[in-house]
Image (cartoon, helix red, strand yellow):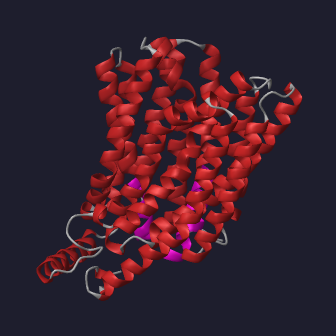
């Protein structure tokens, strides 16, 4: 499929900041503890607080993108993220660290929502999931390159090498902002007209005693969509597996060599880079999205069972079992990503995509906030029963996505027929 200039710019912007993020992710923990001098427990607490703030900021910043225009909002938030990353190099005490971490997480969460709203305004609905798959592949390619740069800094081990990584990450967000600035502007006048109709309809619905998705009060009143976002958060608990839980599991519960940690990371990023677009090709609507989510739930459940089998075996057997588990996990990850992307757009009102994506995106921050603590206890401390419980929970969430998303779609149709959402308004081109 040929890509349009806006799609290419979106991909380049994704590649730019993902390279910086890859370097940041591989070095930040050691920088904060070994260079900045913060205790590991305080680093964990500060990041937890920061991502908690980020999860709360996603919706209002997404709403800002809807009302003020997603392109300008995304540019400003990309610059704010770069400033926060650069500020980490000045942190020496816990309170400044928490403040900077909160600013970083809020800017990242808002940027993700604004970019989704920008994508929705520039890309036809039928092409969005395919483009998101390409962007995900680009993201993983950038992360792999950035991880290599971070590895060089880890090998050097000096303060200047670590600071250079943070500078690269900050600059990558400046480049991202410049690329986003080159995109066509999604007209604010159209958004404002739609918002005005939505507000008027909301007032009318309150006066008549009816309720629905367009009622004044924001995305949190759309309970079916909120439940879909909650179920997606359960699926996103896979996020800490590769970066935190599997390294701890490998070194404490198996006889596999420690270098396998980096090998599994490279394997994951390579598979997503090569096959995410293909995995998303058949996901074009609500039914196909829920089908791929169900299949991915079974694969993820199998991956958890395989990971559990790696404990107490010989080093070579453990290595083979872990590689098999990682392959199953990345296949499930690609399917879950494609299915959730489709649902997040299909179930959101056209005039409030940024706000709705802000809520949907809080799943990432919640998983990053609660996932490390929850999964470390569940998997590393509890062992095999914990893996089986996690796999069962993800399978249940995958199956629940079907009826819940259909209910959300029906609720949206009812609201539109009552005039509660501006689906009948033609947006100027």
* In-front residue for pair 167/93: 93
Q: Position of residue 366 (x, y in %)?
A: 43, 44
- Secondary structure mostly taken by the magenta-highlighted segment of the chain: helix
Q: Is residue 137 left or right of residue 417?
A: right
Based on the picture, tell me whether residue 356 belongs to the magenta stretch: no
Q: Write the residue at 64% across / 65% down.
A: 294
For residue 285, say whether it is visible.
no
| Above-or-below relation of 99 to 177 | above
* In-front residue for pair 116/417: 417
Q: Position of residue 268 (x, y in %)?
A: 70, 44
| Above-or-below relation of 393 to 203 | above
Q: Write the residue at 33% across / 26% down.
A: 98
**Total count of labels:** 0
Q: Position of residue 362 (x, y in %)?
A: 40, 50
* In-front residue for pair 36/421: 421
Q: Position of residue 296 (x, y in %)?
A: 67, 59
- The residue most toward the left is 207
Give the quarter of the figure containing the N terminus: bottom right
- The residue most toward the front is 385
Q: Write the residue at 41% across / 41% down.
A: 174
Based on the picture, tell me whether residue 127 belongs to the magenta stretch: yes
Q: Write the residue at 35% across / 42% down.
A: 54
Q: Which residues are magenta?
A: 113-138
For residue 332, say whether it is visible.
yes
Q: Is residue 263 left or right of residue 81?
A: right
Give the quarter of the figure containing the C terminus: bottom left
């Amino acid at each position: 499929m040929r890509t349009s200039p806006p799609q290419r710019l979106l991909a380049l912007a994704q590649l730019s900041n993902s390279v910086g993020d890859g370097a940041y992710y591989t070095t930040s923990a050691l920088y904060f503890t070994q260079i900045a001098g913060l205790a590991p427990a305080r680093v964990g607490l500060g990041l937890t607080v920061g991502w908690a703030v980020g999860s709360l900021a996603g919706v209002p910043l997404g709403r800002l993108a809807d009302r003020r225009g997603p392109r300008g909002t995304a540019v400003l938030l990309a610059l704010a993220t770069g400033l926060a990353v650069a500020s980490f190099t000045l942190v020496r005490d816990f309170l400044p660290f928490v403040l900077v971490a909160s600013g970083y997480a809020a800017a990242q969460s808002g940027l993700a929502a604004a970019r989704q709203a920008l994508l929705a305004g520039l890309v036809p609905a039928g092409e969005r999931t395919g483009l998101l798959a390409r962007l995900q592949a680009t993201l993983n390619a950038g992360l792999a390159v950035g991880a290599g740069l971070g590895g060089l800094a880890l090998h050097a081990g000096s303060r200047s090498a670590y600071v250079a990584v943070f500078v690269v990450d900050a600059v990558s967000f400046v480049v991202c902002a410049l690329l986003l600035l080159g995109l066509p502007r999604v007209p604010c006048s159209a958004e404002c007209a739609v918002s005005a109709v939505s507000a008027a309809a909301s007032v009318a619905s309150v006066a008549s005693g009816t309720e629905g998705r367009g009622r004044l009060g924001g995305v949190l009143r759309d309970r079916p969509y909120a439940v879909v976002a909650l179920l997606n958060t359960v699926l996103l608990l896979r996020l800490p597996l590769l970066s935190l839980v599997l390294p701890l599991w490998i070194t404490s519960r198996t006889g596999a060599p420690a270098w396998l940690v980096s090998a599994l990371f490279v394997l994951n990023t390579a598979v997503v880079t090569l096959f995410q677009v293909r995995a998303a090709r058949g996901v074009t609507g609500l039914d196909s999205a829920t089908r791929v989510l169900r299949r991915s739930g079974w694969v993820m459940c199998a991956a958890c069972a395989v990971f559990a089998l790696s404990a107490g075996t010989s080093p070579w057997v453990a290595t083979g079992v872990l590689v098999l588990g990682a392959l199953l996990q990345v296949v499930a990850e690609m399917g879950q990503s494609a299915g959730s992307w489709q649902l997040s757009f299909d179930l959101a009102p056209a005039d409030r995509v940024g706000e709705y994506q802000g809520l949907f995106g809080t799943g990432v921050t919640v998983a990053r906030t609660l996932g490390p603590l929850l999964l470390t206890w569940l998997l590393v401390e509890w062992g095999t029963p914990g893996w089986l419980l996690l796999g069962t929970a993800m399978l249940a969430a995958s199956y629940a996505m079907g009826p819940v998303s259909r209910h959300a779609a029906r609720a949206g149709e009812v609201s539109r027929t009552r005039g509660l959402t501006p689906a009948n308004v033609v947006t100027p081109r």
